[in-house]
């Protein structure tokens, strides 16, 4: 039962890291990346629909995204959704596809994005620490209920802390890689 607590904590920490990675994928680093458009919802017949379900996104050049809608009548809706997003990019609608040129990042903008990565990393670490807290509380409760001994509790808490440290290091590593990618351009 006590090992279940550690396994559950590991699993939840992996999920926290996966969420962090997904959020990192949505950060613009000066190169075209189809995941930039993942969070965009298009108003399709009154229903907010993910852009990726309504069109295919390709990368014909290093800094160009091309959105090809499955239904050509949705071009204007897709264009409006991209404009309304917080990406800060302007789509070009040529009547059949939408081209999005990813502008070169300025030094100042790179610093802002690097700070954003830091904030996301901190959010990820907080999620990991919350998982640790829940696991520690569960272990304390089990010890209090007599399910495990005090020595077992201490040993398991050390294991939980090690898993937490590993997850935190992984988040730091991913954040550093993304920051390098952004600042190197």
Image (spheres, rainbow, N blue to C red):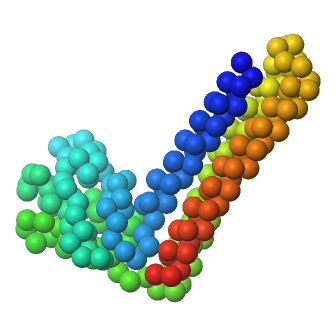
Q: Is residue 36 above or below residue 159?
A: below
Residue 92, image x and y in percent?
19, 73
Q: How many marks?
A: 0
Q: Quadrant of residue 95?
A: bottom left
Residue positioned 26% across, 45% down in the render: 49
Residue positioned 68% across, 56% down in the render: 169
Of residues 48 and 28, the one nearer the viewer is 28
Of residues 60 and 155, the one nearer the viewer is 155
Residue at the extreme bottom: 107
Residue 72, image x and y in percent?
8, 56
Residue 19, image x and y in percent?
51, 48
Residue 145, image x and y in percent?
85, 13
Of residues 2 and 44, the one nearer the viewer is 2
Q: Quadrant of residue 87?
A: bottom left
What is the quadrant of the N terminus in the image? top right
Q: Is residue 116 above or below residue 2?
A: below
Q: Is residue 83 left or right of residue 110?
A: left
Residue positioned 60% across, 37% down in the render: 12
Note whether residue 139 is visible: yes
Note whether residue 126 is visible: no
Residue positioned 75% across, 23% down in the render: 2
Q: Is residue 137 above or below residue 118?
A: above
């Amino acid at each position: 039962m006590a090992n279940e607590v550690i396994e559950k904590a590991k699993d939840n920490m992996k999920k926290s890291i996966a969420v962090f990675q997904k959020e990192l994928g949505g950060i613009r680093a000066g190169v075209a990346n189809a995941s930039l458009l993942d969070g965009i919802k298009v108003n399709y017949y009154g229903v907010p629909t993910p852009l990726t379900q309504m069109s295919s996104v390709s990368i014909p050049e290093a800094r160009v995204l091309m959105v090809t809608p499955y239904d050509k009548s949705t071009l204007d809706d897709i264009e409006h959704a991209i404009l309304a997003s917080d990406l800060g990019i302007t789509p070009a609608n040529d009547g059949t596809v939408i081209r999005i040129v990813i502008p070169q990042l300025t030094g100042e903008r790179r610093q802002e994005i690097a700070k954003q990565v830091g904030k996301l990393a901190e959010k990820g670490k907080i999620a990991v620490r919350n998982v640790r807290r829940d696991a520690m509380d569960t272990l304390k409760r089990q010890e209090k209920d007599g399910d495990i001994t005090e020595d077992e509790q201490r040993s398991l808490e050390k294991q939980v802390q090690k898993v937490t440290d590993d997850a935190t290091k992984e988040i730091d590593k991913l954040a550093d890689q993304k920051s390098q990618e952004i600042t190197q351009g």
